[in-house]
Image (cartoon, grey):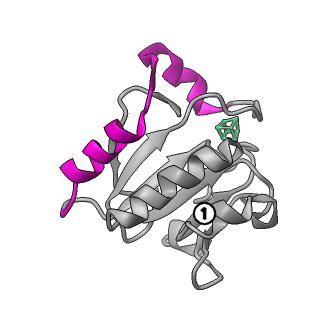
């Protein structure tokens, strides 16, 4: 899996209620206008192997609670393995994807997800009430988008 450097970013606001390890996966094919990932190219890319990944999971064990993959739904089986490893190491999992609805995500991925933010970038962030994007609790089949909009 090719990711932008640094391999891991500890993030607090991408997944409500969790301290997350954010992984920015390179090569998203959707090409949304205004995609912020383009600005990450200047930091370079690295091949994230499973052994590197597990080392990071061990390093942050007891500190972080979830792993968030951003941009990787199209990786199919490869992403599934990384999600499975996250869960077997005690982390919750979250996917940020440009797919337009949950039904488009492969079943092997869904099975290993706790949360998912879906929807292309159309210029209106999740924190705005008229955003096209949604943040979903997969296990409880519940829309949690409102958690990003509290105080709006
Ligand atoms: S789906 Fe996300 S990562 Fe992919 S091009 Fe759109 S904004 Fe960028």
Element type where label 1 sits in the image: strand
Counting from the top left corner in percent of width and height, residue 40 is at 50, 24
In the rendered image, which residue does mark 1 sit on? Answer: 116
Residue 152 can be seen, yes or no? no
The percent coordinates of residue 91 (x first, y second) are: 36, 65
Q: In this figure, what is the number of numbered marks?
A: 1
Dividing the picture into quadrants, the one containing residue 109 is: bottom right
Residue 34 or 21: which is nearer the viewer? Answer: 21
Relative to 107, say whether 56 is above or below.
above
Give the prevailing secondary structure in the magenta stretch.
helix
Name the one closer to the observer, 1 or 40. 1
Would residue 142 be counted in the magenta stretch?
no
Read off the magenta span. 35-62
Residue at 54% in and 22% down: 39
Q: Quadrant of ligand 1?
A: top right
Of the pair 80 and 115, the residue shown nearer to us: 80
Percent of width and height locating residue 132: 76, 58
Q: Is residue 73 above or below residue 33?
A: below
Residue 6 vs 61, above or below: the answer is: above
Examine the rendering and report whether any part of residue 138 can be seen: yes
Left or right: 2, with 87 as reference point: right
């Amino acid at each position: 899996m090719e990711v932008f450097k640094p391999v891991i970013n500890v993030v607090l606001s991408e997944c409500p209620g969790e301290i997350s390890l954010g992984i920015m996966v390179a090569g998203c094919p959707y090409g949304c206008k205004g995609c912020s990932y383009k600005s990450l190219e200047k930091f370079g890319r690295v091949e994230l192997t499973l052994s590197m990944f597990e080392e990071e999971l061990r390093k942050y064990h007891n500190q972080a609670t979830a792993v968030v993959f951003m941009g990787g739904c199209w990786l199919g089986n490869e992403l599934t393995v990384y999600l499975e490893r996250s869960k077997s190491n005690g982390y919750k999992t979250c996917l940020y994807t440009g797919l337009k609805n949950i039904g488009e995500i492969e079943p092997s991925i869904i099975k290993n997800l706790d949360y998912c933010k879906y929807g292309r970038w159309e210029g209106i962030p999740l924190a705005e009430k008229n955003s096209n994007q949604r943040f979903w609790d997969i296990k409880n089949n519940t829309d949690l988008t409102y958690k990003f909009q509290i105080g709006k």
